[in-house]
Image (cartoon, rainbow, N blue to C red):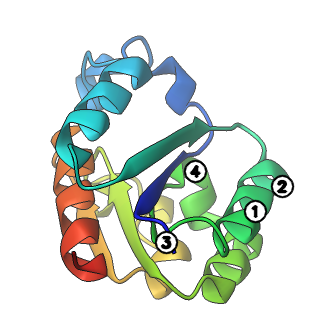
Amino acid sequence: MPKSILVLNGPNLNLLGTRQPEIYGADTLPDVERKCRDAIGEWGTLDFRQSNYEGELVTWIQEARDTHAGILINPAAYSHTSVAILDALNMFEASVVEVHISDIHQREEFRHFSYVSQRADHIIVGKGVAGYVEGIHKLIQLIGS
């Protein structure tokens, strides 16, 4: 298995930097990608993707079974609704880290539950985009050298 991490971003994360900056901050998704690439360094490769479509995220998770050593996922709103993403992650045998920019447990009640958390090996919430960097480091630790 190549030393590669797949970073998946769910719906509306393409609008980071302009979408509710009081909640999500001023960093854009390309800023987040740069931070993730810096965090992975020489350890391995990074495959960074975003989709507003649940089925596309599911397909990417399925494909990752043969190509990636770990997944860092911010499922965004699909956290609270997608059994399909959970099922796909349950078929992925390597490490999974879930990240949320905001603290979903301090927001609206419907955001407190995440299907993805049932599969995640580690969960990071409320640390802004720095949570992505922490997630990359955690995945490297989980995967090993």
Is residue 10 shown above or below 32?
A: below
Camera-side residue of 13 and 142: 142
Sequence-earlier tag: 1 or 4: 1
Tell me if mark 1 has few (under 14), some (14-19) or many (20+) residues whose alpha carbon lies within 10 angstroms of its own.
Answer: some
Q: Which residue is mark 4?
A: 77
Work out how far the residue at label 1 is from the one at label 2, CA to CA, in angstroms. Answer: 5 Å
Q: Which residue is mark 2?
A: 55
Proximity of marks 1 and 2: CB atoms separated by less than 8 Å: yes
What amino acid is found at the position of numbered circle 1 in the picture? Val
Is residue 46 shown above or below 142?
A: above
Tell me if mark 4 has few (under 14), some (14-19) or many (20+) residues whose alpha carbon lies within 10 angstroms of its own.
Answer: some
Secondary structure under tag 1 reads helix
Secondary structure under tag 3 reads loop
Sequence-earlier tag: 4 or 3: 4
Relative to 120, 63 lies left or right:
right
Residue 112's image quarter?
bottom left
Residue 141 image point, x, y percent: 18, 75
Residue 73 appears anywhere in the view: no
Proximity of marks 4 and 3: CB atoms separated by less than 8 Å: no
Proximity of marks 2 and 4: CB atoms separated by less than 8 Å: no
Residue at 80% x, 49% y: name it.
56
What amino acid is found at the position of numbered circle 3 in the picture? Ser
Residue 61 image point, x, y percent: 67, 65
Q: Which mark is residue 114?
A: 3
Tell me if mark 3 has few (under 14), some (14-19) or many (20+) residues whose alpha carbon lies within 10 angstroms of its own.
Answer: many
Q: Which residue is mark 1?
A: 58
Kindly report which numbered mark, 3 or 2, lies closer to the viewer in this rendering. 2
Residue at 28% x, 69% y: name it.
139
Residue 16 image point, x, y percent: 42, 22
What amino acid is found at the position of numbered circle 2 in the picture? Gly
